[in-house]
Image (tube, rainbow, N blue to C red):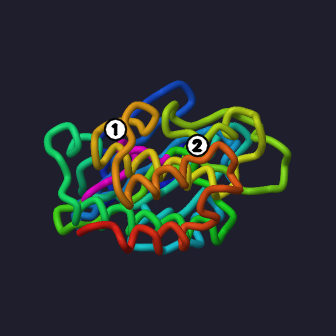
Amino acid sequence: MQLFDFPEEYTLLGTLRETPGRELQLWENTRLHKKLLLRHSGCENEALYESLCEISHPNLRQIYDVRSNDTHIEILEEYLEGEALANILAEKKLTKQEVRHIMLALCKALGALHSLSIVHRDIKPENILMGKHHEVWLIDYDASRIMDGKNQDTRALGTPGYAAPEQYGISASENTADIFAMGVLLNVMINGNHPAKKMCRGWAGHIVRKCTQMNPKKRYQSARLLAQACFYLPG
């Protein structure tokens, strides 16, 4: 049973993604020509999505409302017109200015999330949308968690290569797990490779090495500090 009861002017356009226990639907207000996303998910992230409703940020997908019952939750989300960074990287090499712009925008997004003790835990090109007017959005909170002081994560989530070591049960992932992924992302945007395969050079290489330290305490300790370093990237 669907928990959100849409008015008559809303029409279901289709299902964008469906996996066991999860579904992402696209709805449109036919009168206003405004599209919305409706996400069906398990109940494990209800508190997280309720916290996300408190955030309104130009570099994050807006979460409008959350409803739940004993079996699942539904999340009403902003629909964004954009192209995944992964698709863009497959087609062309980014300019230095574009790389710098994306890193600074994502640092702002992470600053907002981390201020509410939320770790994204799945920063990768597939979860970054680029708008036609140079907008940058960090999306997809399925792997996110609230920093709760536990000794280790209850579930190992994240994308291999981008996920910090602590996301696999070594310790609890904090905001520095996202910093690790940002370092990998920077390297991939510059030379197309994971830093373990080919490290980028110069100041960017210094940033990547600091971001991807195995010891979380040796990384940049906040998105703000990472942004300060990225400000001096060539562009």
Q: Which of 186 and 46 lies nearest the eye of the viewer?
A: 186
Q: What residue span does the magenta drawing correspond to?
A: 123-130
Q: From where the camera sits, is residue 7 visible?
A: no
Pointer 1 residue? 16
Residue at 14 percent of width and 44 percent of height: 92
Amino acid type for the residue under numbered disc 2 = Ala
- Residue 90 as seen in the image, left or right of residue 160: left
Residue at 75 percent of width and 40 percent of height: 153
Q: Position of residue 171 (x, y in %)?
A: 78, 42
Does residue 71 belong to the magenta stretch? no
Disc sitting over residue 143 in the figure: 2
Looking at the image, residue 20 lies above or below residue 14: above
- Residue 141 as seen in the image, left or right of residue 193: right
Q: Position of residue 133 (x, y in %)?
A: 18, 68
Question: Which picture quadrant has residue 184?
Answer: top left
Q: Position of residue 106 (x, y in %)?
A: 42, 63
